[in-house]
Image (cartoon, rainbow, N blue to C red):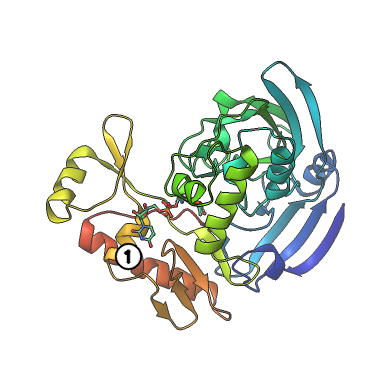
Amino acid sequence: MKIFNDFSLKHYNTFGLNYNCAAFIEVEFAEEIYSINKMFELSETEHLIIGQGSNILFTKDFDGIVIHPTFNNFSMKSQDNNFLYLEVEAGKNWDELVRYSVGKNLGGIENLVSIPGLAGAAPIQNIGAYGQEIKDVIEFVHFFDFNDNIFKVFHNRQCRFDYRNSIFKQELKNKIFITSIEIKLKKNPTPVIDYGNVKDELFKSGIKNPSVNDVCNIIANIRENKLPSPKEIGNAGSFFKNPIVSNSKFEELKKSYPDIPFFEVGENQIKIPAAWLIEKSGFKGKVKGNVGTYHKQPLVIVNFGNASGNEILDFANEIKTKIFVEFGIELESEVNIL
Ligand code: EPU
């Protein structure tokens, strides 16, 4: 392990904000977390686990310990006729894992290409895009429990996955450190192409029976065209979750906005794209000082260079207020605010 004091987090948050933490610990082997917990009693000490910081907004220095996993091996655990089972360590770059699995023509995570972050963070908010979610491939999540001071394993069902949610964001928040995930990938994949314009883009490229590689490439292109790369412009992807409302609330909105887009969630609820609400309320491409919504996808709030965390937060709150006033819907941030 490596320990640094009074460390800048500028390169550990995709908004590119220059806040410091009191101490930064690079964990080079999963087992080290046991002695780190002995040393710092993490259940009692303010701490934060950061992969690439692609879902976090700092508004001030962090007066605690930041723990960053760098161990990133992965190996095949087993296979049967249909699936190959991989165990992937927390520090593995998510996109590299997707590209590896696509390269082997394995299916299940190809639509999750180009999502920034590390494999260990992926189950926490159940990352999802273009019709796939990590919950559909997760078998087990291995983690260390700071309170009980032991390594534990949860089966998929115990993780209580939901839309951008899991037990790791709720009851177990700040109590555990994910060390690896086990995923199952399909040997005979059936591409998922029904979301948004994936089918159209495949058609335009003249692809009739797409392979996982084709779908992965098309989605990588769609994302590249629509979402800003955090390497070029600071952002944390979708800033808000897509709100879920009751059928009756939806019917009421539909009277005023007959063109409102929606996705059904179960029988009684409707998910409304926050991007649409933001666009309708006049915030698409709006810039205020160093902050703005991205002109091609207003759900993404960007830092044009020198914004402070509070400037970004104030701008996000302005959007929230406007949408509450206009639609009676309370947006919830997807990004963790600190
Ligand atoms: N829309 C607009 N105006 C816009 C853009 C979108 O009205 O400028 C409306 C359209 O009706 C469109 C709908 O919003 O059909 C959905 O847009 P999009 O397909 O771009 O997806 P999203 O709901 O905005 C979600 C995820 C993204 C993920 C995409 C693709 C959330 C919070 N976000 O965005 O995830 O990549 O779907 O599956 O669920 C992330 O979590 O950081 C992220 C980028």
Image height of 332 relative to 20, above or below: above
- Give percent across and percent down for residue 257: 17, 55
What kind of element bears circle 1? helix
- Give percent across and percent down for residue 227: 52, 62
- Give percent across and percent down for residue 338: 55, 61
| Residue 187 figure quarter | top right
Dot 1 alpha-carbon crowd within 10 angstroms: few under 14, some 14 to 19, many 20 or more: some
The verdict on label 1 being within 8 Å of ligand 1 is yes
Please indicate, yes or no, whether residue 55 appears anywhere in the rendered image: no
- Give percent across and percent down for residue 79: 75, 20
Please tell me which residue is depicted at 61% across the width and 58% down the height of the picture. Answer: 54
| Residue 4 figure quarter | bottom right
* Residue labelled with disc 1: 279
Please indicate, yes or no, whether residue 318 appears anywhere in the rendered image: yes
Image height of 201 relative to 56, above or below: above
Q: Residue furthest bottom?
A: 289
Please tell me which residue is depicted at 62% across the width and 38% down the height of the picture. Answer: 212
Tally the numbered discs. 1
Please tell me which residue is depicted at 21% across the width and 45% down the height of the picture. Answer: 250
| Residue 235 figure quarter | bottom right
Image height of 336 relative to 268, above or below: below
Image height of 239 relative to 287, above or below: above
Q: Nearer the viewer, residue 226 or 139?
A: 226
- Identify which amino acid the numbered label 1 is placed on: Glu
Please tell me which residue is depicted at 16% across the width and 44% down the height of the picture. Answer: 251
